[in-house]
Image (cartoon, helix red, strand yellow):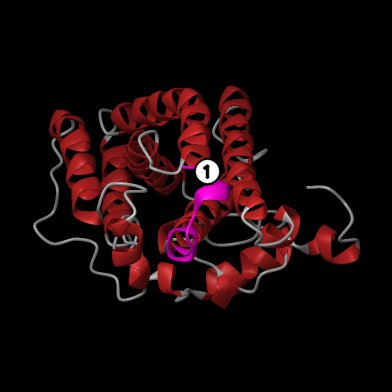
Amino acid sequence: MSVTTLNPENKKAIIKLLYQLADDDFLYAYRGSEWLGLAPHIEEDVASSSIAQDSMGHAAMFYRLLEELGEGNADDLAHARQSHERKNCILVERVNGPGHYMENAQYDWAYAVVRNYLYTTAKKVKIQSLKQSSYQPLADVAVKVDMELHYHLLHWKTWFIQLLSSTDEAKARMKDAYVQVMNDFTDVFSFGKDAELIKIYNLIDTESVLKQKWIDTITPVLESVQLEIPETFDTGKLNGRNGDHTKDLQGALSILSEVYDINPAVAW
């Protein structure tokens, strides 16, 4: 299936899904970039920055697919939309911790590791599904993303296991972060009010299938570090897929759009 063969409802479904995919990686990449110069050691500074850069590249590919579908310029889609127009999940917009990158940053590395591992595992599940998408341009992008995602997942899985196998303090901080992240997983696999439309056109597996594949993937890792899936989690009330967000998102967008607002002609 290509752009020229789409009926209006099919096109609408693809657009709805692409905004979610693009906005997720756009915000995830930004939060990752805030660790530049603040990571635990220089090797990690380079590695995590590279992952953030890759993730921003993934967002760019999704935004370009939206541009090809007539949604407007990719740069405008990334930088000019307001917070209520964003479709990212709540997890990726959360701040890294108290303070500001340029002043008195008190970021939590345990939270970063847990968020990055669980989000990347969820993303891997989605990308594997998208490789079989009925919309070929999206399936082609998924193949490209998957090649880099393998290394991202290996990186964060290693950190996740090592810190949960380390000192009592490290374990305690990781367990606290695990609870915090899991409570924000409400909309990670949600397609919001557009779920049925997206399902009809076989663009990606259903919410329940994706979530179960994610649980099946992380369960052996959790068991290896004496953790388990909570009986109840993802209990958050906000659903970013429907435009509901925290104040953290507006703060992130203000910084992300600074250069763009000065001169929208500058390429991101």
Q: Is residue 202 left or right of residue 255?
A: left
Dividing the picture into quadrants, the one containing residue 130 is top left
Residue at figure coordinates x 27%, y 39% from the top left? 171
Residue at figure coordinates x 64%, y 74% from the top left? 82
Magenta stretch? 1-12
User: Looking at this view, is 49 or 148 the one in front?
Assistant: 148
Residue at figure coordinates x 54%, y 33% from the top left? 40
User: Looking at this view, is 178 or 68 the one in front?
Assistant: 68
User: Looking at this view, is 64 or 96 the one in front?
Assistant: 64
Q: Main secondary structure of the magenta part?
A: helix
11 drawn magenta: yes
The reply to whether residue 131 is in sight is: yes
186 drawn magenta: no
Most extreme residue toward the left is: 231
Image coordinates for residue 234, horizontal then vertical, percent:
24, 62
Q: How many numbered discs? A: 1
Mark 1 residue element: loop
User: Looking at this view, is 26 or 258 the one in front?
Assistant: 26
Dividing the picture into quadrants, the one containing residue 222 is top left
Q: Is residue 48 above or below residue 75?
A: above
The reply to whether residue 96 is in sight is: no
Image coordinates for residue 26, horizontal then vertical, percent:
59, 51
Residue at figure coordinates x 47%, y 60% from the top left? 7
- Disc 1: which residue: 2
